[in-house]
Image: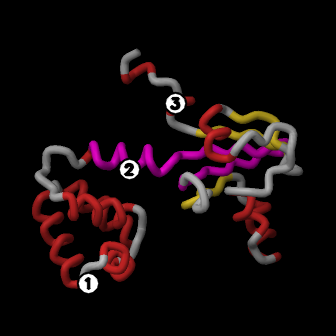
Amino acid sequence: MTDDNISIDLYLGICVRNVNGRVLQQNQICKKLCGEQGGTICRGGCTKFFSAVSEGEREFLESVSMRLVRNVHEDKSVCDAVVIKFPDRIITVLYPKERQIEADLKLFDGYGLTLAEKAILLMVLDGVPNTKIAKKLHISLSTVKKHLNNLYKKLPADFKERISLERK
């Protein structure tokens, strides 16, 4: 199988629910991430996001047909989800973080990044603020900034723009 013919089932979890939350269909990646949910009312993962909002936010969400939910399943295998609402069903597409990290790391091969720079870059691309990066890596804020400056020197302009967009 060539890269051009890769099945979407190898990378993305897909769940189809009715408007009441009953799971109608799941692919294997979704089952791995969420567990077998067929025929049950799903109350986990991306569903938690919708049930934990205020009434005003709920009204807003009812009018939205598509929503990105970051860091779903923090207690399991973390992933981002795109929830798409149709009149009769809800389709959730799950993108596991491990796949995102693999893809992001491949983008930065060949730029001579150190292990610390790669770790910081992945957190930056995930929207983690510098102060939290410092705490997670047990380094000072000035060390984080030094690594970021080194990253900016090593990466081409289009990568720098992507990093800048993620920081906003």
Q: Residue furthest top?
A: 1
Lower position in the chain sequence, tag 1 or tag 3: 3
Residue at the image point whose x is 86% and y is 39% from the top: 39
Q: CA distance from mark 1 to mark 2?
A: 23 Å
Lower position in the chain sequence, tag 1 or tag 2: 2
Residue at numbered disc 2: 101
Lower position in the chain sequence, tag 3 or tag 2: 3
Residue 56 percent location from the top left of the image: 79, 77
Residue at the image point whose x is 33% and y is 49% from the top: 104
Residue 22 percent location from the top left of the image: 86, 45
Does residue 91 belong to the magenta stretch? yes
Report whether 35 appears left or right of 23.
left
Residue at numbered disc 1: 141
Q: Is residue 45 above or below residue 24?
A: below
Residue 54 percent location from the top left of the image: 78, 77
Local crowd at mark 1 within 10 Å, few (<14), some, or many (≥20)? some
Count of residue discs: 3
Residue at numbered disc 3: 10
Q: Amino acid at mark 3?
A: Leu
Q: Amino acid at mark 1?
A: Leu
Residue at the image point whose x is 23% and y is 76% from the top: 144
Report whether 23 appears left or right of 153.
right
SS state under label 1: helix
Q: Amino acid at mark 2?
A: Ile
Q: Is residue 108 above or below residue 137?
A: above
Q: What span is colored magenta in the figure?
A: 78-106
Q: Nearer the viewer, residue 105 or 57?
A: 105
Give the quarter of the figure containing the N terminus.
top left
